[in-house]
Amino acid sequence: MFVHSASAHRPIERLSQVIPAACPRLPDADAVLPYLRRMDAARTYSNFGPLLTAFEARLAERFETGTAVVTCVNATQALTLTLQALDLPKGGLVAIPSYTFVATAHAVVAAGLIPLFLDVDPEDWMLRPATVREALKQAPGPIAATIVVAAFGAMPDLDGWRALRDETGLPVVLDAAAAFDTARTADIPTVVSLHATKVLGVGEGGFLATTNAGLAARLRQLTTFGFRGARVSDIAATNAKLSEYAGAVGLAALDTWDSDRLRFLRTARLVRAAMTYLPEIRFQSGWGDDWVTSVCSVRLPDGSVGAIERSLQDQDIQTRRWWDRGCHANPAFNECPRGDLQVTETLGRSVLGLPFAVDMGEHEISRVAAALGSALASL
């Protein structure tokens, strides 16, 4: 995903003709080595050493003054523990979009709460405050909080969510797992993933950004055995700390973020340009122009996903239904309440993840565009 030498800027040479749906890349060994040497010199490998502390500080600089960043072993744990830190009533409902990765729903369940699956807007694929307002009147029980998801990295209308929070007192959390690029404000608690598949990754990891100092302190305590400055467990908690090794990778990734972001933008614009003759394809608004993410999810003609992915597979082009039919379609959540999910069902049959990587070459992009055009023509 990240490069640190002139030779590494060439498109990678695949071992086969298959074009993968995703091809992540983290900082290479040479980029991470100076940080590893600093770690060895300090003889500190975990427990909030200087590298992780520096990494959190640099992440916090991306947000407004007064933001605290708390890292975690992954974003799912960060979201789970954030819900716990909010001290919500056990068994309460949490309104979430069904159209999201299952980690959102798993985090709710792990926090001792119940997902209430709601539908999303057909244009931006995200939960709307108006939908939650309506659910507050009709839900089968009290709604304790809501999670809005930044769909594939696109940022939702945060002003609308602030208004909902301020008017109703309902806690709002932003699941911005794929939105490292666009997450720049933290007055709504914001959880970001640092998984290897994201635009900035450390392998496994995540963080909460928040301007609520008390929430940040509570989350930190929940990630480290309930300790708060002493080796005494004040509350029941877990061990979800990020190590110095992850901090080293994160610092190396931040060192080249500006240039890597430009490369993501360039690749996304090449993809958009190659598909300008395919009016049936709809990209997310602003994708590759205003913001970057590590995937290319497009809207296809309704109901066409199955036929198109089979056609692309026959041409050695991998695809992914990143969120498939929505969380509600997974057996793990069969018993969870839900609203009318008509839009989610439609998106499950019409949104497909096309191959995308920071170093995707023009030849690969042309192959995907041509294969997609052929598949559309045969519908």
Image (cartoon, rainbow, N blue to C red):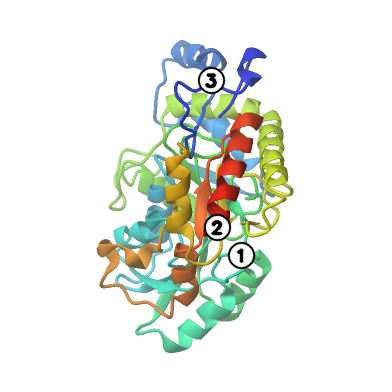
Disc sitting over residue 13 in the figure: 3
Alpha-carbon span between mark 2 and mark 1 = 8 Å
Residue lying farthest to the front in this orientation = 378
- Which residue is disc 1 drawn over? 124
Are the two marked residues, 2 and 1, in contact with CB atoms closer than 8 angstroms? Answer: yes
Q: Is 21 displayed left or right of 226 in the figure?
A: right
As shown in the figure, which amino acid type bears the numbered disc 2? Answer: Ala
Disc sitting over residue 151 in the figure: 2
Q: Is 6 displayed left or right of 316 in the figure?
A: right
**Image spot of residue 93 (x, y percent):** 37, 74
As shown in the figure, which amino acid type bears the numbered disc 3? Answer: Glu
Alpha-carbon span between mark 3 and mark 1 = 35 Å
**Image spot of residue 23 (x, y percent):** 49, 32
Q: How many numbered markers are drawn? A: 3
> In the image, which is nearer the foreground, mark 2 or mark 3?
3
Q: Quadrant of residue 229?
A: top left
* Secondary structure type for disc 1: loop
Image height of 353 relative to 197, above or below: below
* Secondary structure type for disc 3: loop
Image height of 248 relative to 302, above or below: above
